[in-house]
């Protein structure tokens, strides 16, 4: 690993100064580094202080103690323009910009690179067009931003941040309002952008499963103010994930990398079958509150008779033997059996 | 990486043709209305004579020369400067507060000026010193001083607050509250004043470009030109502010400094217009919208010269109509700007809804 980190947190304490000697500390003793070429997701439950951390990293808020170093220099000592040449930002909220075309919006990213008059040179235009191309918005380059869908709009904002040609790009819940396919697409885009140009991209997100799949590293910020840093899989295996998101009624399933609600147990069943049908039947059973155990250990044994791609056909072996061909029927039958 | 293939300054090719056309036609239009303003009036003077008088014709009748050189020319210059100033100040405020309803007076500059004038006009009988000031300096002069002082008081309050607070919204609230305070004091003064004084105050609120003489222009013109240039120089900052202060800061804008310069220049623009011409409404809110619709852009490098030209043209046109050429009556300028302008802007806005989203 590259020994000198692009962005470094050194004994950082974040929070708010409420008055003399009355600080509200969100987290402290943070020691971390971010290296070029990595896509990092910042995860944490609501209220853990993700936004405070982001605000501190971007220099909008002074740290309570310690420092944030960008290329070895404390972030507070950069002039606004010099900082903007190294770091760019994408925020959650939709910005009403009227009939500004995508091109002009992306061109705004050149702000810290142009002179007093804001005149765009040849390099600026190349950077703008590269940025538009790398998020795939060429066909919409002259469309007003107000006519774009939410996903395209956020891509335009990312292109604007790219045109700024930063070493580090920070996105504050930038995928929050998008549907799943758009989020997957955007995460993939961000990861590629980090790799290709050796940038650091830090995204704060609520999307655990997607972050687990896409990010090179995760930062887990827990409500207790602890920040864990690691490769996603390591954090799952060492229990960091479960601990960070620990809360009543919810538990993390390391097998599948997802959370499920703890429900009162309805009983134990066993399931025999293969493929997609088995996977979704299992989910339905879990949702209904059944524990799925070994064959023989439980009173009810469900056998799936379908092969791949044929819908569902099930039977329950046992004294009142019955069968059916939908998940709904299966759940109704099990409920009836229970009562 | 495939090229999109664009023109040098990056806009859509069609827009460049539109802008090129506008840069030629707008100045011609403004010059034309300026000429009309010189030629038309309650006393009819043949256009040929008007121009020879302007070129220094000593043969023309003394009365005509006085009308053109001492009344119509300063009046037309005042209207041009005031319109341009209000258009620019309106654009600045709409962009700074990202609010399409903002006008040059959202920060209460107007109310400060009204308070200054009301104090002078209505307390003239009651307080000895204002009366003597009015006698010594002449009535017109004292009104200008009074409204300048009023505008400057509100402006300094806003500028002091602007240096302290982070959020522009707080600033807006301070401005609006200062405005309420000033207008309530004006109302109380009105309650205790006599009919004649009321008349004089209300006369001032009608607005007029006619009260400005050459010696006034010696202060008014440099104030407008200087702060107008200062405002224009902030075009890049205004573009960045379109995305909000968070993004603007992330793009390297020193937000507080830019905001201070924007408020300073727009206050001087709006304050000096109010001081010399009275509270001229409507132009400041309408001109930026019309400019955006005409030029189809939000780029302030294009909008700044456009609002200057359109503001000047509209102010001249409104004054022309208010004078009701050929008759001896003159209508209140403020009523004309809104009466003719409001339905027009309403029509355009309702036809193109996205303008409403155009926070700026």
Image: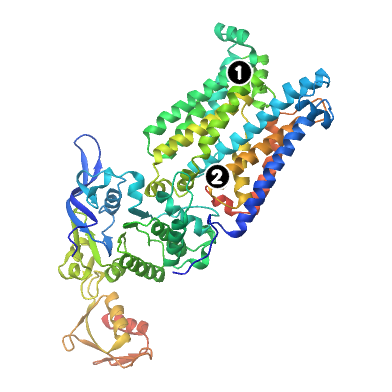
Q: Is residue A34 above or below residue A216?
A: above
Q: Chain of mark 1?
A: B
Q: Is residue A339 above or below residue B200?
A: below
**Does label 1 or label 2 sit earlier along the sequence?**
2
Determine which residue is flagged by label 2: B100
Whether tag 1 and tag 2 are in contact, CB under 8 A, the answer is no
Q: Position of residue A77 (x, y in %)?
A: 27, 43
Colouring method of the image: rainbow
Badge 1 crowding class, 10 Å Cα cut-off, few under 14, some 14 to 19, many 20 or more, is many
Quarter-wise, where is residue B142 in the image? top right
Say what secondary structure mark 1 lies in.
helix
The quadrant in which the N terminus of chain B is found is: bottom left
| Left or right, residue B66 beside residue B198 | right
Say what secondary structure mark 2 lies in.
loop
Question: Residue A52 versus residue B223: which sits nearer the camera?
Answer: B223
Q: Position of residue B304 (x, y in %)?
A: 56, 42
Query: How many numbered dots are placed on residues in this image?
Result: 2
Question: Residue A18 versus residue B308: which sits nearer the camera?
Answer: B308
Q: Position of residue A17 (x, y in %)?
A: 24, 39
Q: Position of residue A308 (x, y in %)?
A: 34, 91
Q: Residue at x 21, y 76 (%)?
A: A255
Q: Which mark is residue B250?
A: none
Q: Chain of mark 2?
A: B
| Left or right, residue A316 beside residue B298 | left
Q: Residue at x 58, y 12 (%)?
A: B123
Q: Nearer the viewer, mark 1 or mark 2?
A: 1
| Left or right, residue B162 beside residue B322 | left
Badge 2 crowding class, 10 Å Cα cut-off, few under 14, some 14 to 19, many 20 or more, is many
Quarter-wise, where is residue B84 in the image? top right
Whether labels 1 and 2 belong to a single chain: the reply is yes
Residue B324 visible here = no
Determine which residue is flagged by label 1: B143
């Amino acid at each position: 690993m590259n020994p000198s980190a692009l962005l470094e947190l050194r004994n950082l304490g974040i929070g708010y100064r409420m008055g003399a000697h009355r600080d509200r500390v969100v987290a402290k003793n943070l020691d971390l580094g971010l290296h070029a070429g990595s896509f990092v997701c910042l995860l944490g439950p609501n209220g853990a202080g993700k936004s405070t951390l982001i605000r501190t990293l971007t220099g909008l808020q002074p740290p309570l103690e310690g420092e944030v170093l960008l290329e070895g220099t404390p972030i507070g000592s950069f002039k606004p323009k010099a900082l903007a040449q190294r770091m760019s930002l994408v925020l959650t909220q939709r910005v009403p910009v009227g009939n500004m075309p995508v091109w002009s919006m992306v061109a705004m990213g050149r702000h810290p690179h142009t002179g007093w008059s804001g005149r765009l040179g040849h390099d600026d235009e190349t950077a703008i067009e590269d940025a538009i191309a790398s998020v795939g918005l060429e066909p919409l380059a002259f469309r007003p931003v107000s006519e774009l869908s939410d996903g395209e709009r956020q891509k335009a904002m990312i292109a604007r941040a790219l045109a700024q040609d930063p070493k580090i790009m920070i996105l504050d819940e930038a995928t929050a309002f998008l549907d799943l396919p758009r989020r997957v697409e955007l995460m993939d885009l961000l990861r590629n952008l980090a790799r290709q140009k050796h940038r650091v991209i830090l995204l704060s997100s609520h999307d655990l499963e997607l972050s687990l799949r896409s990010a090179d590293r995760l930062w887990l910020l827990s409500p207790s103010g602890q920040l864990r840093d690691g490769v996603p899989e390591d954090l799952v295996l060492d229990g960091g994930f479960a601990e960070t998101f620990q809360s009543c009624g919810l538990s993390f399933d390391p097998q599948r990398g997802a959370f499920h609600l703890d429900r009162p147990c309805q009983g134990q069943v066993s399931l025999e079958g293969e493929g997609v049908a088995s996977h979704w039947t299992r989910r339905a059973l879990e949702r209904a509150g059944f524990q799925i155990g070994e064959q023989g250990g439980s009173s009810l044994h469900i056998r799936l008779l379908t092969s791949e791609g044929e819908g569902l056909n099930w039977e329950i072996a046992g004294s009142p033997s019955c069968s059916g061909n939908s998940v709904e029927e299966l759940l109704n039958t099990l409920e009836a059996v229970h009562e | 990486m495939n090229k999109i293939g664009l023109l040098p300054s990056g806009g859509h090719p069609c827009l460049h043709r539109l802008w090129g056309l506008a840069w030629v036609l707008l100045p011609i239009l403004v010059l034309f209305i300026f000429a009309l303003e010189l030629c038309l009036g309650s006393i009819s003077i043949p256009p040929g004579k008007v121009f020879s008088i302007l070129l220094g014709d000593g043969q023309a009748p003394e009365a005509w020369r006085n009308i053109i050189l001492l009344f119509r020319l300063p009046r037309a210059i005042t209207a041009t400067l005031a319109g341009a100033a209000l258009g620019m100040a309106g654009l600045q405020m709409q962009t700074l507060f990202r609010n399409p309803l903002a006008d040059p007076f959202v920060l209460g500059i107007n109310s400060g000026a009204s308070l200054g004038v009301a104090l002078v006009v209505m307390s003239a009988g009651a307080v000895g010193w204002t009366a003597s000031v009015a006698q010594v300096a002449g009535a017109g002069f004292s009104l200008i001083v009074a409204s300048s002082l009023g505008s400057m008081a509100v402006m300094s309050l806003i500028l002091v607050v602007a240096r302290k607070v982070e959020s522009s919204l707080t600033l807006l609230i301070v401005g609006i509250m200062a405005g309420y305070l000033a207008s309530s004091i004006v109302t109380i003064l009105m309650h205790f004043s006599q009919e004649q004084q009321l008349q004089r105050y209300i006369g001032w609120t009608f607005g007029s470009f006619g009260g400005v003489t050459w010696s006034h222009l010696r202060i008014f013109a440099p104030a407008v030109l200087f702060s107008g240039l200062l405002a224009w120089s902030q075009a890049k900052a205004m573009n960045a502010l379109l995305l909000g202060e968070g993004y603007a800061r992330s793009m390297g804008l020193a937000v507080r400094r830019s905001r201070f310069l924007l408020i300073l220049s727009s206050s001087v623009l709006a304050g000096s217009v109010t001081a010399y011409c009275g509270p001229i409404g409507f132009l400041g809110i309408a001109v930026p919208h019309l400019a955006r619709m005409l030029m189809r852009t939000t780029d302030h490098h294009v909008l700044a010269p456009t609002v200057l030209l359109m503001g000047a043209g509209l102010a001249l046109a409104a004054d022309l109509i208010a004078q009701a050429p050929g008759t001896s009556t003159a209508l209140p300028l403020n009523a004309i700007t809104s009466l003719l302008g409001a339905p027009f802007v309403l029509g355009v806005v309702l036809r193109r809804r996205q303008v409403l989203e155009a926070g700026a």
